Amino acid sequence: MTQQPFELPHFYMPYPARLNPHVDEARAHSTAWAREMGMLEGSGIWEQSDLEAHDYGLLCAYTHPECDGPALSLITDWYVWVFFFDDHFLDMYKRTQDRAAGKAHLDRLALFMPMDPATAMPEPENPVEAGLADLWKRTVPAMSADWRRRFAVATEHLLNESMWELSNINEGRIANPVEYIEMRRKVGGAPWSAGLVEYARAEVPAAVSGSRPMRVLMETFSDAVHLRNDLFSYQREVEDEGELSNGVLVLETFFGCTTQEAADMVNDVLTSRLHQFEHTALTEVPALALEKGLTPDEIAAVAAYTQGLQDWQSGGHEWHMRSSRYMNERARTDRPWHGLTGPGTSAADIGALLASAGSERLRAHTHVPYQQVGPSQIPDFYMPFQVELCPHLPGARQRLVEWSHRMGILQEGVWDEDRLDAADLALCSAGLDPDATEEALDLSAHWLCWGTYGDDYYPLVFGHRRDLAAAKLTTERLAACMPVDGGEVPLVPSNAMERALIDLWTRTTARMTPEQRRTFKDAVNSMTESWLWELHNQFLNRVPDPVDYLEMRRSTFGSDLTMAMCRMGHGPAVPPEVYRSGPVRSLENAAMDYGCLINDVFSYQKEVQYEGEVHNLILVVQNFFGCDYPAALAVVHDLMTQRMQQFEHVVAHELPVVYDDFQLSEEARDAMATYVSDLQNWMAGILNWHREVDRYKPDYLARRAHGFLPDRAPAAGVSVSLG
């Protein structure tokens, strides 16, 4: 290789790497297995010398130090297979840019992962298919149906999202940072690796496998694994292979900085994700175990899985330092985090390193709330879509006031008519759905009113009293207000939020199937549960990790709820798997982020100065990069612009491919075109609403600094919500 493009940074790695004693057994087995599957001589991809140089046996021995010999051999075979797949796909389809053949190759691979082990597989036609068929048969008998489903999904994501990388290479397109993190999890395969950690150590109990804490453990693990790999593989991927999917290149392009500066930033994000992993493991996971009533064996399984993810981090790092596959010639060889007593270590050096790590972690908790930040600065947003307003807006405004009184929203000490008028939520609904009927516009405005009121209520009532237990009880009761079977609500409403939600749920879901109700309820629950996450950070005075913030922001903003409402009128013409496809999720996430970040820009003074909030991306960027408000605003504005450009890119280039892939009817294509238009209206309507309403304007904030109404502070019974 040529001269290194940057110096590798000092990595935060507090867990010691340990080597499995069965490493030689795994090496020998995987070499024989790869030859048997046809991956070596004659494959046109690898020779035995390539396999030996990469040393996947060493990788797996470092990343799975505690499993026995047969298990280590099986896991090593999986890694041989996945790296062979990656190199095979590069040679056969990325270098040739043959998308049609690449898709046909990927479509067949799902046939070799049947949920029922008794299901017959087709005859393998190449080493990739042969390897997957053999591995699936050897692995799934030992695992539960829940694990099989999750692992198959992770494998399919790893395989199928290779098409996303191929499409970007074809177009010469470099992803924006948010898109990259999301897609890298699928393409990079770390969620898939987490599944093999379960095989090696302990399976995550099904009762908690879909929870936020377990998801965050997996995602922070994934992000750290991928970003570390991006640093070591930049030279091979970007300079040799022409790869565009690399975090260093993504940040280099987004910030317009040098490669070294981008590499250092990638390492900062990597460190932040490891800190988030540790925070989640030490605070959220124990609370989850208590909440779900896990048995001692289940708690031990979660602990073993968490330890397994830590082993993977340290082992993967050690392997990158040794493998010929990567740029590591001038990597730092000191081990300050787990070699403090070794010869030649300096107490001064150790102290400096520990102080550096401590200051990075402490910085998230040292924000001083209620600082005066001045009026929010509003940049010239890139908005290619024109806002249109529903003609039924005037009547909807009056009916919203009447409904709010009827539900009790204006009688609890949090809102009065002045605050409701300052929010003008009917204006937002009129922009989101300009073609709405009177009934549909009222329903939308009432949902926005309920969600915005709840978003204000939780931090004011529960945050003011530091009462997380009452907040959790309220959230549980709100979930109970939404019966999926269409039956009676099993509780008597005790406050405005419950009364209003029962009313909205009844009106919204009357004609839905149970499955549609379940999806819609999940969207509402996603929002209410995210308010608990905000409270938890508020109590800790913790400015969130940037990646965790952006992903949770979609929930706190109610984006899933909005998307569910957008889809309701589209009928069955669009198959559910289309909505689940990568490009459609990418489209939705880009729109969500644009809307969320509009709110962060306009609400900066309201949240930071008047409410003491820590949940605003401008503040998150200031804290993470140590920069001032104008610089952080510029970063957020650039990100918004790129998210909007990504939305346009997906519409122009990726959705037509999805339509062809799923062979959609003209009716379905028309429905999807309407959905795209709905999302365009959603973004334009949200921007217009923020520009027009008083809720975020400095003169209104000075007059009505956010807090309880002076004569109507909520009583204790309201916060506990017992009815």
Image (cartoon, grey):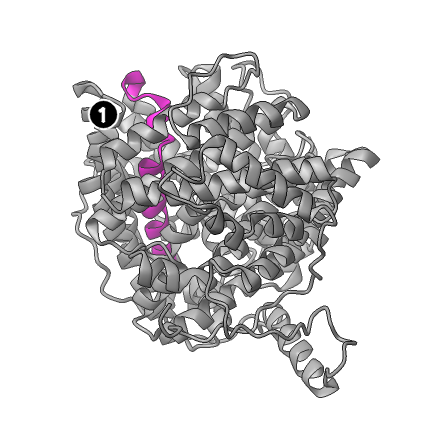
Total number of numbered discs in the rendering: 1
Q: Is residue 46 above or below residue 116?
A: below
Q: Position of residue 462 (x, y in %)?
A: 64, 51
Prevalent SS, magenta region: helix
| Magenta stretch, residue numbers | 571-599
Mark 1 residue element? helix
Taking 47 as reference, is 341 left or right?
A: right
Q: Quadrant of the N terminus?
A: bottom left
Q: Position of residue 384 (x, y in %)?
A: 17, 51
Question: Residue flagged by tag 1: what amino acid is it?
Answer: Ala
The picture quadrant where one finds residue 287 is: top right
Taking 231 as reference, is 584 left or right?
A: left
Q: Residue at x 47, y 58 (%)?
A: 325
In front: 94, or 250? 94
Can residue 527 be spotted in the picture? no
Q: Quadrant of the C terminus?
A: top right
Q: Please say whether residue 577 is one of the residues in the magenta stretch.
A: yes
Q: Residue at x 44, y 77 (%)?
A: 627
Q: Residue at x 31, y 17 (%)?
A: 572
Taking 515 as reference, is 389 left or right?
A: left
- The residue at which mark 1 appears reads as 671
